[in-house]
Amino acid sequence: MTVRLRLTLLYGALFLLAGAILIAITYFLYRDRLDADPLRGRREITIAFEGRNVGDKDGKRLVDFLSKDGRTVLHFIDEFYDDVLADALREQLEQSIVALGLTSAAALLLGWFVAGRVLRPIQRIAETARASSESNLHHRVNLRGPRDEMKELADTLDSLLERLERAFAGQRAFAANVSHELRTPLAILRAEAELRLAGGDADEADRAFARRVLEAAEGGERTVAGLLALARSESGLLSRTEVDLAELTGDMAGELAASTGRLEFALDLRDAAVRGDRALLERLAANLIDNAIRHNVPGGWVRVETEATAETAILRVANSGPRLSDADAQALFEPFTRQPAAMADDPGGHGLGLSIADAIVRAHGGTISAKARAEGGLEVEARLPRQPA
């Protein structure tokens, strides 16, 4: 049951209990009052009268109370007063129970309304927390009202979101600035190494050293490019355009497949239009396909699929490769995380491919998952909303 329903039932139960106690107290007080002598303390009654038996009715004695002058003052059935008292108490109890039932139903409706009003700030807080993410922390509750527990909770969440927004913005800015600053020295190292290799006066030791420097510079440039892409995708979408995910993925697959002739490619590209950042979506498709190529086995295969439902565009990339556990597959989404087998097969990788893909998908409001195949290899599926909020 929801909290609102539980509060409503609690209000109703408390009202019913209080009503039952009130009815019981009223019943006993009323009965005690009726059992008292009705003439006790009534000094204004001065007429003297006497009772005379005048017959029987239904087994009960009929009595007439006569005044001194012989007039009938009261026609009375003996034991009739007790019957009237019992009937009055029973009627009062029945009517009270009916009234309690009706008011209890009204109390439940009122409790449902009051519980909704009480829980409305919590719903706003939950909606704000749900709408917030690592790349979208500008939402605030901004709860208005008295300085009570709800207002304090909402203000605490707003303060937390504000600090998180500053922290993530600083982190992205730091990664972007460091990446930009590293580009220049890496470019100088690359140029120096290429000049050394192109020169004819270098001996073999110098050329070997230059090749190692060139490989390190290229690896550093790939890492810097990955960090820039990661910071760019975590900053959110700068533009949204209509993108045909099938056409875009086909272009990326064609470019990357041309660089390797040892793998079998299978494409099943169905129309999958989506609104998003074209540059980031190109990077998403390129990273997933490049990972499938890099972390494969000789003579293996890569399968790329796109499809769409009424609300979701799907990009799925599967490949053959070394066996992984499901835990290893999920860990690949962490930055700079690589499996030992992948490090041995591809020492030039930087472990940012799936991290960047994850950030791009989340920036579009979608989800991405990786599933280890029992025969070896990985299947990665990205699901993007066709019309993101």
Image (cartoon, rainbow, N blue to C red):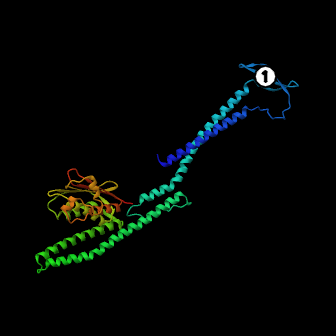
Q: Quadrant of residue 108?
A: top right
Mark 1: secondary structure:
strand
Relative to residue 52, is residue 203 drawn left or right?
left
The residue pinned by badge 1 equals 63
Q: Which residue is found at the position 71% from the left and 19% from the top?
A: 59
Quick check: can you spot residue 141? no
Q: Position of residue 28 (x, y in %)?
A: 67, 35
Image position, residue 349 (x, y; %) = 22, 65
In this view, 177 is above or below 267: below
Q: Quadrant of residue 133?
A: bottom left
221 over 275 or under it: above or below: below
Name the residue type under label 1: Val
Compared to residue 270, the image places residue 85 above or below, namely above
* Quadrant of the image containing the C terminus: bottom left
Asked whether 308 or 139 is in front, the reply is: 139
Q: Position of residue 339 (x, y in %)?
A: 23, 59
Q: Compared with residue 153, is residue 206 higher up or lower down, i.e. above or below?
A: below
Residue 314 lies in quadrant: bottom left
Q: Residue furthest bottom?
A: 201
Q: Is residue 226 left or right of residue 48?
A: left
The answer to whether any part of residue 366 appears in the image is yes
